[in-house]
Amino acid sequence: MANSGVILKVYFDVMHLYYLAQYLPVSDKLTEKGHTAVFVIHQNTDQIEILKQVVTAEQLNVIWVEDTQTARARYLADKPDWLVTGNLMEDLDAIHQHTKTALMQHGIGPKSCYYTVSKALTSVRFVEGPHRLERLKQLYPNGEFVDTGYAKLDPVINQTSQAFDLLKAELDPTKKTLLYAPTFYPSSIEMLPKNWPEQLSDYNLIIKPHFFTYCKKRYKKQRALLAHWQTYSNVYFAAQHEHSLLPFMQSADILISDASSTLFEFVALGKPAIWCDFYKLRWTYRGIFSYRFKQRLDPDLKYFAEVATQVKNPSELKQAIKKLVENPEIKADKRVEYTAKMVGQVDGSVSERIVAYLESH
């Protein structure tokens, strides 16, 4: 039962589907302790069937809203004890009259938005590791920040999540498995050759792009290339409803990524990664506009080179994979060191710490 007999009503603001993987371990812990967890899902007409499919599969307690304004009206009307958000939420004063708010950032990557989302201060922000905690305290001295670790990884550490089934996906379990998980922008996708999976025929290749790559119009070139790669027999292309990276991370031996928080997540599991430090940039981010690229990515990006094999040219990628397959222990000590610094405690108890805070406040 709940702590001190008090039953909490906690709302989770699901602006985008990929927030769920971070929320679910916390909501499961809340439910286990007798509290009520409600997912407020923002409808997207292009994605509604996918959203409904996930809601059914995860058996979520859901409120559907049309947009951020509708969601806000619902929070003001329902007055939950806690509102958990995964992104910036403006004008919190009215909500704070009846509801406390918590920010659980949806990723732990190197984009500058990791820090700027706290410009509108929630009642508390749950933070990953001492480095980020210290930076946030310096940027927002009036904020409440608590280093709990990254809840998304709890199911893997506790062995409560199911690994991706290679046999069911018609991949070869005797081969090493690569997971390519690029972000949407800046992305490495369009920098890779059309026959890339053919170059990696000795391996299984799971491709799990960012949610926006699947659905945003401006990334149609990325989708075209991904659709071609999907035709290779050694490739599994994750379906849109497979919203969580966790099963794929569990089954993969090596991660290949770019400016995605997935890299920190993967090395936190004690596995080796490759950082594709090459990106297809819009013309508005090149030349005299290159400052925009630097603004989008935070200096924390430099830590990728500490924990992963850095590749600056697509032509070098195949050899980098081969070397890491043969020597997975490369940078193992650094992975441990920087996980403690950038991700925090990886002990399977992050959700428990978060729920304990919600209960005691």
Image (cartoon, grey):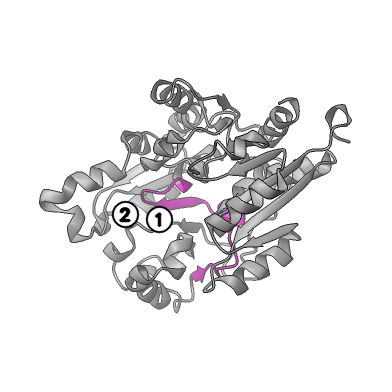
Under circle 1, the secondary element is loop
Q: Is residue 66 above or below residue 265?
A: below
Crowd class of label 1 (few under 14; some 14 to 19; many from 20; radius 10 Å): many
Residue 253 among magenta residues? yes
Q: Is residue 309 above or below residue 213?
A: above
Number of on-image labels = 2
Q: Quadrant of the C terminus?
A: top right
Viewer-nearest residue: 259 or 298: 298
Q: Is residue 198 visible?
A: no
Looking at numbered disc 2 in the image, what kind of residue is underneath it?
Pro
Residue at label 1?
183
Q: Is residue 313 visible?
A: yes
Q: Are marks 1 and 2 in contact (CB under 8 Å)?
A: yes
Residue 115 among magenta residues? no
Q: Pinpoint residue 223: horizontal percent, then vertical percent.
A: 39, 72
Looking at numbered disc 1 in the image, what kind of residue is underneath it?
Thr
Under circle 2, the secondary element is loop
**Segment colored magenta:** 234-262
Viewer-nearest residue: 12 or 219: 12
Q: Horizontal placement of 45 versus 164: left or right?
A: left
Residue 328 numbered tag: none
Q: Pinpoint residue 197: horizontal percent, then vertical percent.
A: 39, 69
Task: Find the residue positioned furthest to the left.
Answer: 288
Viewer-nearest residue: 83 or 95: 95
Residue at label 2?
186
Q: Pinpoint residue 75: horizontal percent, then vertical percent.
A: 65, 48
Q: Pinpoint residue 239: horizontal percent, then vertical percent.
A: 55, 70
Q: Quadrant of the N terminus?
A: top right
